[in-house]
């Protein structure tokens, strides 16, 4: 199981990530609000502006202060490292 750092020492399992999206669009804002209302939100932004929304296979919504590009790079770097080990 590989973990990805999503900021401020917080990690998420790379295998559980379904989508990594920007929080700017109206559908994502509705998704975030619905998740907050039902208790499925995990806010790891430490009070900073949310710049990335991670959706997991368990329908949890993780809010991060890192940009989507930074998290995507960490995921792809982790995938490349996994290929080297095989």
Image: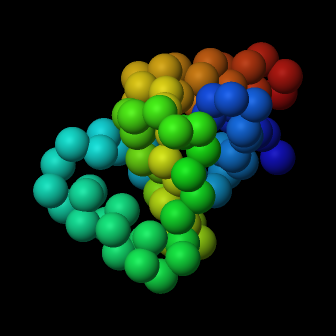
Q: Quadrant of residue 4?
A: top right
Q: Position of residue 77 (x, y in %)?
A: 62, 19
Q: Quadrant of the C terminus?
A: top right
Q: Residue at x 52, y 39 (%)?
A: 47
Instruction: Mark yes or no: residue 11 visible.
Output: yes
Q: Give the camera-side residue of 47 and 58.
A: 47
Q: Left or right of 22: which side holds 74?
A: right
**In the figure, 86 relative to 59: above or below?**
above
Q: Position of residue 60 (x, y in %)?
A: 54, 66
Q: Residue at x 58, y 58 (%)?
A: 42
Q: Residue at x 24, y 66 (%)?
A: 30
Q: Give the camera-side residue of 81 and 14.
A: 14
Instruction: Mark yes or no: residue 83 visible.
Output: no
Q: Quadrant of residue 8?
A: top right
Q: Looking at this rendering, what residue extends furthest in the left direction? A: 26
**In the figure, 43 relative to 48: above or below?**
below
**In the figure, 28 relative to 50: above or below?**
below
Q: Looking at this rendering, what residue extends furthest in the front direction? A: 47
Q: Position of residue 61 (x, y in %)?
A: 49, 60
Q: Quadrant of residue 16?
A: bottom right
Q: Residue at x 25, y 58 (%)?
A: 29
Q: Give the camera-side residue of 7 and 83.
A: 7
């Amino acid at each position: 199981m590989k973990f990805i750092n999503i900021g401020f020492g917080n990690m998420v399992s790379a295998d559980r990530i379904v989508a990594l999206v920007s929080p700017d669009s109206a559908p994502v804002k509705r998704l975030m609000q619905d998740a907050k209302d039902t208790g499925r939100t995990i806010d790891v932004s430490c009070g900073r502006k949310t710049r990335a929304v991670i959706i997991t296979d368990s329908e949890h919504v993780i809010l991060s202060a890192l940009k989507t590009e930074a998290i995507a790079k960490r995921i792809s770097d982790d995938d490349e490292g996994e290929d080297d080990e095989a």
